[in-house]
């Protein structure tokens, strides 16, 4: 009988247990816990008693990597609570705003966070010495996403123009046209990214799960649509809590989610592409064909391919939105606080985000419910890891630990800062 | 001469200020040529141990283990710099400092006993000596680049102590407070953002925190004059930098004014 314990520390100077703890007996995983140390900030608590006009600025601060998703989701939930309809142009601008974050976040993940792993470098710094052209391309794409976010929102991190009812400020037609042309030029970089990812040797491990994503009648899901899975889930944001059970686990400050009557599920680029491949823009679909990729694909190691396709899609779709946008219809409609409850979902770069608020008649928050994409995925990460480890258990310790880290990074978790700071320790018993 | 060693530490935060460092795309590779990024977990797996020449600290201290980790970071860094509002003042999560901690945990977690946090989210100055501060939620990239450039040349970076109004005027904006009666915190907020909100037709909400010579009584009078209630003004100060001294001063004034009114029997 052999027993093997593996410990991957997320934060080297944290006392006690590390972030990923695994105990294997006779090739089978006996215990597996993914610990999230990120101290909680109690957003759902500190939002209580705040005005409905402040909520989006608060929730933005939940994540500095995808603040736009947190702003959009909060604003849409609040607007449902007070019964406010925004203009079609505002909806288009919001979609564009969200897509800008996909461009930024996906290029950050592919080039700076994932590629160094897959090519055997500790970071993009060393990668930039070996392949400067690739890193420069990644930085160009990331800057494009940031510049689009800043064009609409004033700045790239915690942008400022998105408010209840719309935007405080709209870029000029000239700025929009210049951005559209820049996006169209950047398609080459995005397609080159697909070719780069197609050339990577990815682990062949496959794992089946339930895929869940927003499906929009009008196209690929971003800020609207029903939340749909390949196993029969088909709901509106308002009904979320009837279908998703969130629970606390002893080893993590982040909550876990499962589908009621079901198990773990995956959200994020791979789930979206698996469910919505047909809705991708033609250029993204052609890129997939060129790369020889077929979807649905199973197992998170394929997520980088989905991310690369979404990068192409987000750029093409953003250019298309800018091409047809009518900037006249952008006024913020009049509104007043009123008592009510509203829920919304958006597709953040790393998966579905859920917000729900109840407001009193002065527009003050009485109840807030927020579930982050990474929270949706945590149970799924543990589940996939449990299946994955027996397939790589014979690798040397350092390689095994790296493979486990890579599996976590496939989900591009919001704790990516932590997952890149791994002091690996494996104890054999 | 060896390149200066730089470390970036994360405490309780959203990672947005660290991302602002990665977002200096056009300068990133130049920067990497001049310094040795020895420790930056968000960007690299490799860890080169201290001592470091400059340590940037993102985040506030809100969990027991963070105190020790911050003290260790202090020992390892010749110069320790607060990176953004969380490290500077405690950040948005410091709003928990003003409410019952147990109730707050219970509002978020089914089993609050498993959550180990400090009752207060505090600025890093509360625990260690701090050599420099970059304000903002998030930090401003130009300020970051200027800060690193000045430090590398042995100079003290100087961002001035002007309020946002000065930058707003330089941008030729029309004053939203005077012309439209919007409750703008520009007069009491430290400049550095470039008056972004004002340049996008929105009143300042104070993400860079109060500037040193904040005139809280005058700001409160102006906001009252615009028709804001005491509670509404309170929320202006209890925002992203609620734990900064100037914001606490504002809150104390509003509370004492409310007490005075209650005692005198006026509304």
Image: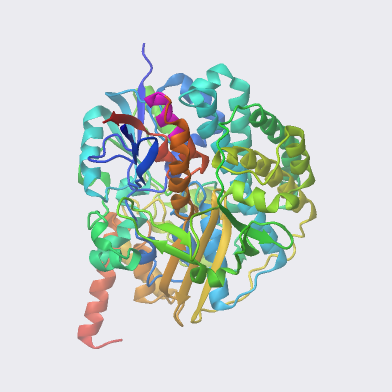
Question: Quick one: which residue is furthest to the front in this view?
Answer: A1
Locate residue A214: give its quadrant: bottom right
> For the view shown, which residue lies furthest in the top direction?
B1
Residue B159 vs B204, above or below: the answer is: above
Q: Residue A299 at x, y = what percent?
A: 56, 42
Judging from the image, the colouring scheme is rainbow
Q: Can you say whether B161 is above or below A239 in the image?
A: above
Q: Is residue A398 magenta?
A: yes
What quarter of the picture does the N terminus of chain B occupy? Answer: top left
Residue segment shown in magenta:
A396-405
The question of residue B157 being in magenta is answered with: no
Viewer can see residue B184: no
Q: Is residue A272 left or right of residue B213?
A: right
- State the residue lying farthest toward the bottom: B265
**Residue beneath the point at 42% across and 34% down:** A420
* Residue nearest the viewer, comparing A74 with B133: A74
Near-viewer residue (A376 or A298)? A298
Name the quadrant of the C terminus of chain B.
Answer: bottom left
* Image quadrant assignment for residue B15: top left
Front residue of this view, candidates A267 and B232: A267
**Main secondary structure found in the magenta portion:** helix
Q: Position of residue B71 (x, y in %)?
A: 21, 37
Instruction: Say which of A411 and A229 sits in front.
Output: A229
- Compared across the picture, whether B223 is left or right of A318 comes to left
Position in image of residue B95 (x %, y %) = 32, 61
Report x, y in % for residue B219.
37, 65
* Residue drawn at point x = 64 percent, y = 31 percent: A197
Q: Is residue A100 above or below residue A129?
A: below
| Location of residue B69 (image quadrant) | top left
Q: How many marks?
A: 0
Q: Tell me: residue A422, above or below residue A300.
A: above
Residue B163 seen in the current view: yes
């Amino acid at each position: 009988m052999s027993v093997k314990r593996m410990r991957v520390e997320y934060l080297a100077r944290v006392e006690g247990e590390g972030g990923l703890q695994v105990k294997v007996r006779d090739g089978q995983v006996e215990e597996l816990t993914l610990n999230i140390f990120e101290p909680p900030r109690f957003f759902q608590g500190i939002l209580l008693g705040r005005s409905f006009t402040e909520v989006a600025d608060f929730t933005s601060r939940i994540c500095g990597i995808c603040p736009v998703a947190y702003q959009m989701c909060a604003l849409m939930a609040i607007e449902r609570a007070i019964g406010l309809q925004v203009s079609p142009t505002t909806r288009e601008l919001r979609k564009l705003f969200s897509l800008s974050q996909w461009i930024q976040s996906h290029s950050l993940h592919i080039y700076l966070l994932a590629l160094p792993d897959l090519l055997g470098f500790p970071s993009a710094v060393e990668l930039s010495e070996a392949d400067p052209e690739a890193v420069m391309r990644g930085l160009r794409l990331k800057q494009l996403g940031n510049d689009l976010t800043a064009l609409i929102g004033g700045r790239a991190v915690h942008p400022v123009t998105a408010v209840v009812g719309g935007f405080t400020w709209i870029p000029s037609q000239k700025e929009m046209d210049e951005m559209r042309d820049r996006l169209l030029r950047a398609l080459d970089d995005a397609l080159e990214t697909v070719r780069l990812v197609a050339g990577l040797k990815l682990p062949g491990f496959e794992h089946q799960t339930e895929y869940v994503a927003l499906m929009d009648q009008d196209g690929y899901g971003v800020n609207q649509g029903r939340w749909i899975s390949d196993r029969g889930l088909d709901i509106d944001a308002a009904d979320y809590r009837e279908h998703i059970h969130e629970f606390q686990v002893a080893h993590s400050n982040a909550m876990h989610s499962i589908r009621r009557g079901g198990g773990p599920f995956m959200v994020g680029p791979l789930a979206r592409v698996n469910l919505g491949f047909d809705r991708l823009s033609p250029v993204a679909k052609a890129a997939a064909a060129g790369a020889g990729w077929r979807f649905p694909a199973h197992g998170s190691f394929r997520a980088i391919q989905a991310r690369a396709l979404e990068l192409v899609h987000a750029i093409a779709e953003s250019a298309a939105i800018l091409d047809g946008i009518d900037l006249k219809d952008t006024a913020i409609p009049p509104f007043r606080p009123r008592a009510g409850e509203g829920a919304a979902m958006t597709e953040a770069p790393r998966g579905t985000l859920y917000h729900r608020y109840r407001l009193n008649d002065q527009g003050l928050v009485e109840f807030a419910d927020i579930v982050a994409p990474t929270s949706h995925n945590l149970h799924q990460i543990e589940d996939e890891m449990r299946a994955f480890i027996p397939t790589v258990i014979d690798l040397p310790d350092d390689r095994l630990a790296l493979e486990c880290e890579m599996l976590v990074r496939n989900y591009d978790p919001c704790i990516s800062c932590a997952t890149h700071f791994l002091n690996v320790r494996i104890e054999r018993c | 001469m060896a390149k200066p060693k730089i470390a970036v530490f994360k405490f309780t935060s959203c990672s947005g200020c660290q991302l602002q460092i990665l977002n200096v795309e056009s300068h990133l590779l130049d920067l990497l040529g001049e310094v040795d990024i020895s420790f930056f977990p968000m960007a690299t797996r490799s860890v080169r141990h201290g001592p470091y020449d400059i340590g940037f600290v993102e985040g506030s201290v809100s969990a027991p283990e963070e105190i020790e980790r911050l003290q260790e970071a202090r020992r390892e860094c010749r110069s320790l710099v607060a990176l953004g509002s969380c490290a500077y003042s405690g950040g948005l999560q410091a709003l928990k400092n003003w409410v019952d901690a147990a109730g707050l945990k219970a509002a978020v977690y089914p089993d609050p006993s498993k959550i180990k946090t400090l009752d207060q989210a505090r600025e890093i100055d509360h625990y260690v000596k701090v050599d420099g501060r970059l304000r903002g939620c998030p930090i401003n990239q130009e300020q970051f680049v200027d800060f690193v450039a000045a430090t590398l040349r042995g100079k003290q970076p100087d961002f001035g102590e002007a309020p946002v109004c000065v930058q707003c005027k330089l941008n030729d904006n029309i004053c939203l407070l005077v012309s439209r009666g919007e409750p703008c915190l520009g007069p009491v907020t430290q400049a550095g953002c470039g008056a972004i909100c004002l340049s996008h037709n929105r009143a300042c909400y104070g993400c860079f925190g109060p500037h040193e010579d904040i005139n809280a009584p005058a700001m409160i009078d102006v906001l009252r004059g615009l028709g804001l209630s005491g509670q509404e003004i309170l929320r202006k100060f209890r925002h992203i930098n609620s734990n900064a001294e100037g914001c606490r001063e504002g809150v104390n004034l509003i509370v004492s004014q409310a007490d005075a009114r209650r005692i005198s029997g006026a509304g």
